[in-house]
Image: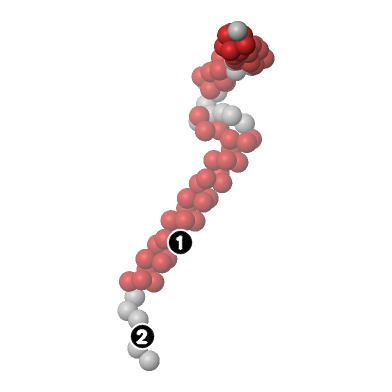
Amino acid sequence: VVTLLRKQRIPVLLHRAFSSSARRLRNKVPEAQKLFQEDNGLPVHIKGGTSDVLLYRATMTLTIAGSCYSLYWLLVASMPQRKP
């Protein structure tokens, strides 16, 4: 009898946990769609605001710096070594 009661409680507890947490969340996708589909002349990577601009610039800076660093070491590796 005890195991039968446990088996009946588990699905009810799981249902409560998932259904109660789902009600608190709000769908923000329609708001984001309106923001990004708005025709204001800005590129997509800047439409999100200041944080998107900073993230884009940081990504581009790291990409260019990494490329330059790689080219520098490629140049160093292509030079013949001096023999003492």
Q: Looking at the picture, how far across and down is residue 32, in whole percent?
A: 57, 20
Mark 1 to mark 2 CA distance (whole Å): 22 Å
| Residue designated by label 1 | 69
- Looking at the picture, does residue 53 appear above or below residue 1? below
Q: Going from the N terminus, do you reach mark 1 or mark 2 first?
A: 1
Q: Looking at the picture, how far across and down is residue 84, in whole percent?
A: 38, 92
Please give left or right for residue 39 compared with residue 75 in the image: right
Q: Looking at the picture, how far across and down is residue 71, in whole percent?
A: 40, 62
Residue at 52%, 26% in the rendered image: 41
Disc 1 residue crowd, few under 14, some 14–19, many 20+, Cα 10 Å? few
Give the numbered dot on residue 7: none
Disc 2 residue crowd, few under 14, some 14–19, many 20+, Cα 10 Å? few
Q: How many marks?
A: 2
- Looking at the picture, does residue 51 appear above or below residue 10? below
- Looking at the picture, does residue 41 appear above or below residue 55? above
Residue at 53%, 29% in the rendered image: 42
Which element type, helix, strand or loop, lies under badge 2? loop
* Location of residue 79 (image quadrant): bottom left
| Residue designated by label 2 | 82
- Looking at the picture, does residue 45 appear above or below residue 78? above
